[in-house]
Image (cartoon, rainbow, N blue to C red):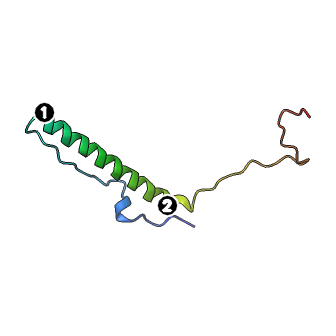
């Protein structure tokens, strides 16, 4: 079946912003660290939502077993 349109939260053009402080170098680095952590968390959440949305459409192919049931690929016994 065709993939229906994804929820709005999964839009390919989804843009996020994270506030940074520029009052002092220390405060700037602390706000940068917090913003990077939040961006990482948001990305993980988005990727998980995409994985769930397309998971039903992924096909996993299994390697077929040989006819004699021997899984030894180099032919030695």
Residue located 34% across and 46% down the image: 40
- Vertical comparison of 1 with 36: above or below: below
Relative depth, front residue between 73 and 33: 33
Apparent side of residue 40 relative to residue 52 in the rendered image (left or right):
left
Would you name the residue on which mark 2 appears?
52
Residue located 54% across and 59% down the image: 55
Residue located 16% across and 44% down the image: 20
Apparent side of residue 42 relative to residue 27 in the rendered image (left or right):
right
Which quadrant of the structure image shows residue 58? bottom right
Relative depth, front residue between 13 and 31: 31
Would you name the residue on which mark 1 appears?
25
Q: Secondary structure at mark 2?
A: helix
Q: Residue furthest left?
A: 23
Q: Are marks 1 and 2 in contact (CB under 8 Å)?
A: no
- Vertical comparison of 2 with 25: above or below: below
Q: Secondary structure at mark 1?
A: helix
Rounded to the nearest angstrom, the CA distance separating label 1 from label 2 is 40 Å
- Vertical comparison of 75 with 8: above or below: above
Which quadrant of the structure image shows residue 1? bottom right
Of the numbered discs 1 and 2, the one sitting upstream in the chain is 1
Observer-side mark, 1 or 2, equals: 1
Residue located 30% across and 45% down the image: 37
Q: Position of residue 73 (x, y in %)?
A: 82, 36
Apparent side of residue 46 relative to residue 60 in the rendered image (left or right):
left
Q: Position of residue 71 (x, y in %)?
A: 83, 43
Q: Position of residue 19 (x, y in %)?
A: 17, 48
Apparent side of residue 24 relative to residue 55 in the rendered image (left or right):
left
Which quadrant of the structure image shows residue 25? top left
Q: Which mark is residue 50?
A: none
Q: Residues within 10 Å of mark 2 (few under 14, many from 20)?
A: few
Rendered-image quadrant of the C terminus: top right
């Amino acid at each position: 079946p065709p993939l229906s349109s994804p929820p709005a939260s999964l839009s390919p053009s989804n843009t996020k912003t994270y506030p940074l402080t520029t009052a002092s170098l220390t405060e700037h680095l602390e706000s940068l660290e917090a913003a990077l952590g939040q961006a990482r968390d948001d990305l993980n959440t988005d990727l998980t939502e995409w994985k769930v949305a397309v998971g039903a459409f992924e096909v996993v192919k299994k390697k077929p077993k040989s006819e004699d049931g021997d899984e030894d690929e180099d032919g030695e016994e």
